[in-house]
Amino acid sequence: MLQSARNDELDDFVEWLGELTRQVDSSLLDEWEKLAAGDDLDQADLVRPPLDATAPRPVSGNARAFRVLVRNAMFRRVELAGRRDRATLGELDRDAGWDADAWEDAMAPYWDEHPTLLTDADARGPALLMIDDSTEPGVWRVRQILHDPEGYHDWAFLASVDLAASDEAGYAVVHLGGVSCG
């Protein structure tokens, strides 16, 4: 691959794909990494080793890959809010006490100010997602800034990510805390 074609998004994707592969079978990742490094595979490498009896690494074990999961979970909410799909949002965040009516109430002031919520590449980009993993052990605080058409970026979804619950579930467990302006 041309080094000039690499960027942070591609590196995040490669890291996420590697972690996904490691969760399925780490021997596949070992072979992939050897090939990527330009190493020749021996015939012994092509014989599948016995499955390791140790437990796979927790989903939060690779911070970069886990950040991709969190970014995807937060952007899913942005997409649903952009479509004004409060019913699906309510289902998604029901465990955090958010139903369709709560989403309607929280987003009403945004819709009073802005006609649309953008869901383009800039809206999904890392510049609009803030993750604080240092405030509280086992919890990440997340701020997904909403990409309004005027570019004010004054609205955001606030959430927390429970690392222990995520490890148990095998995906990012996100608890929405609120919708804020300012």
Image (cartoon, rainbow, N blue to C red):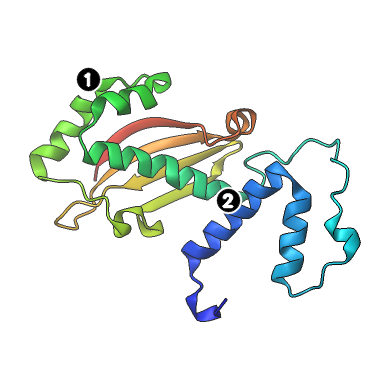
CB contact under 8 Å: marks 1 and 2: no
Count neighbours of disc 2 (C-alpha within 10 A) and say few if under 14, some if 14 to 19, many if 20 or more.
many
Q: Is residue 1 above or below residue 142?
A: below
Q: How many marks?
A: 2
Look at the numbered disc 2 and give the secondary structure of its residue: helix
Provide residue 116's location: percent of width, then percent of height.
14, 46
* Above-or-below relation of 104 to 142: above
> In the picture, which quadrant includes the N terminus?
bottom right
Residue at disc 1, secondary structure: helix
| Residue located 68% across and 38% down the image | 58
**In the depicted view, which residue is nearer to us: 137 or 124?**
124
In three-dimensional space, the C-alpha distance between marks 1 and 2, rounded to whole angstroms, equals 33 Å
- Which is more toward the observer, 136 or 86? 86
Would you name the residue on which mark 2 appears?
65
Say which mark, if any, is on residue 176.
Answer: none
Q: Residues within 10 Å of mark 1 (few under 14, many from 20)?
A: few
Please state if 123 lies on the left or on the right of 6 as rendered. left
Of mark 1 and mark 2, the one earlier in the sequence is 2
- For the point 39% across and 41% down, the residue is 74
127 w.r.t. 55: above or below: below
Question: Which of the 4 quarters of the picture holds residue 175?
Answer: top left
What amino acid does circle 2 point to?
Ala
Q: Position of residue 155 (x, y in %)?
A: 24, 45
Q: Residue at x 83, y 37 (%)?
A: 54
Q: Which residue is mark 1?
A: 101
Measured as percent of width and height from the top left, residue 63 is found at 61, 50
Residue positioned 37% across, 59% down in the render = 127
In the rendering, at what x and y percent does residue 38 appear? Answer: 74, 75
